[in-house]
Image (tube, rainbow, N blue to C red):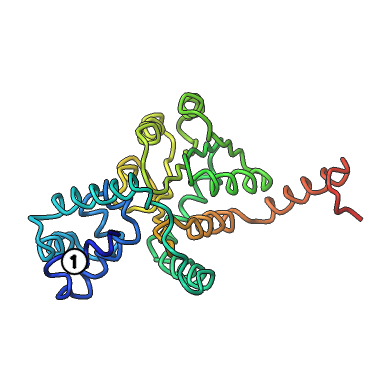
Amino acid sequence: MTIEEWLAGRIGYDTLGPQAGQVVHVLIRAPQFATYSSAREVAERAGVNVSTVVRTAQQLGFEGWTDLRKELRDHYLDSIAAGDSGPPPRPADAAGRTLRQDAANITTLTTGENLQAIRDTAAAIRSARRTVVIGSGSGAGPAHILGHLGTIMGHDIQLALGSATAQAVQVTRLGKGDCLLVLNVWRLTRALRGLTRLGREQGATVCVLTDLRSSPLAEDAHHVVVTPTEGVQGTASLTAMVAAVQAILGELTDAESSRTAGRVQQAWNDLDLMDDQP
């Protein structure tokens, strides 16, 4: 029995309202996320308030979110044990649905609060003596883009994406006037949480890109950009986070950065490094 079938068989399922339906949608599309998340995190992902999550659980016959989550976890783990944890059948027009979802994620990203946080993050990088970028898992992809292009533009950006011990070495070198940029998608590791706190204690300006406004990383951040990561089949999409990185780079672009990037390009040509040169 799939999670969708299990939920559809619950008493009260047929009478759920639109907002409760959004909660159920999250449980079906992102069961792994829901099995370890708080009611607050599920509410944020569903675009509803916490009380709606609790009421949805009660309408489905549970005492509250905790009880629903426990049974959801049992069903999710059973599906893994039975070998049914693979991706669901590909939906019709998967490519189109994916692109439309990513477009919606970018639209959701462009709130006034996020745009201001993006500008503030760029300002922190621009004024910093040194910027260290840390992340784990899926967050490493957008981090590489920021580090590579930001360095070409002339900023001292150092990627620290290896082991937690190596990351700690980089973060301990930060101080007042430096910047720590943290990227987190999906689950939060203890190491990333601790390193973010350490960066704040070192006096660095801490900027966080995350997919949850309720992320514990926000407690130590000066600036937080919340990037939607909804995919079409329960997997995280990084499109909005990459867009946020591109927006930060856009804010960093000026005459000096363009000249610096031009010198880098000329050096590549002088060294005959590229195969596409005239």
Residue 49's quadrant in the figure? bottom left
Disc 1 on helix, strand or loop? loop
- Where does the C terminus fall, quadrant-wise? bottom right
Name of the residue lying farthest toward the left: 63
Asked if residue 10 lies left or right of residue 47, the reply is: left
Residue 216 x %, y %: 30, 43
Is 225 or 31 nearer to us in this picture?
Answer: 31
- Examine the rendered structure and indicate whether residue 73 appears above or below residue 54: above
- Examine the rendered structure and indicate whether residue 26 appears above or below residue 92: above
- Examine the rendered structure and indicate whether residue 206 appears above or below residue 75: above
Asked if residue 49 lies left or right of residue 112, the reply is: left
Q: In this figure, which residue is indicated by the disc labeled 1?
A: 9
- Where does the N terminus fall, quadrant-wise? bottom left
Say what amino acid the circle numbered 1 marks: Gly
Asked if residue 73 lies left or right of residue 64, the reply is: right
Q: Say which residue appears at 87% left-offset and 40% top-offset.
A: 271
Q: Say which residue appears at 86% left-offset and 49% top-offset.
A: 275
